[in-house]
Image (tube, rainbow, N blue to C red):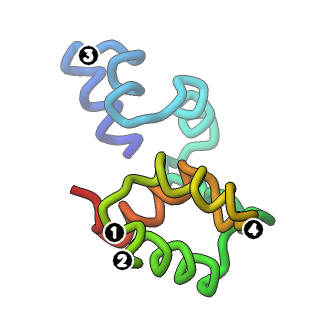
Amino acid sequence: MLSWAEEAQRDGARLSSICKVLGLNKRTLERWRARGGGSDRRQGPRTSPANKLSAVERAQVLKAANSPEFRDKSPHQIVPLLADRGVYLASESTFYRVLREAKMLR
């Protein structure tokens, strides 16, 4: 990646534009140059979030969203209806995320 950035810079591209295309901070490229290597050492988070839904909880969200009662409703409508019954499965945004990941949104 560093060699590509250096080649683009030699061809006249600005470093800030290169970084934007690569999705990197300018300082990251500078650090890679100083270290003498250009491997991407980003690793992302080492642990999963403590509030991540379990597979069982995700299944409950999908089951609720696909139940005959809620089949024609959006998460915006489902969550308050469940809350009125004293049931909390997930937030509205989590409902949307789970449905999107399951490719169940129109």
> In the rendered image, which residue does mark 4 sit on?
47
Name the quadrant of the C terminus: bottom left
Badge 3 marks a residue whose secondary structure is: loop
Give the residue displayed 62% in from the left and 62% down from the top: 82
**Quadrant housing residue 18:** top left
Q: Mark 1 or mark 4, which has the lower sequence index?
A: 4
Q: Which mark is residue 68?
A: 2
Q: Are marks 2 and 1 in contact (CB under 8 Å)?
A: yes
**Quadrant housing residue 17:** top left
Q: Mark 2 or mark 4, which has the lower sequence index?
A: 4
> In the rendered image, which residue does mark 3 sit on?
13
| 66 lies above or below 83 | below
User: In the depicted view, which residue is nearer to us: 84 or 13?
Assistant: 84
Q: CA distance from mark 3 to mark 1?
A: 52 Å
| Residue, far bottom | 56
Badge 1 marks a residue whose secondary structure is: loop
| Eye-nearest disc, 1 or 4 | 1
Instruction: Bin the neighbour count of mark 1 within 10 Å (Cα to Cα): few under 14, some 14-19, many 20 and up.
Output: few
Residue type marked 2? Pro
Q: Mark 3 or mark 1, which has the lower sequence index?
A: 3
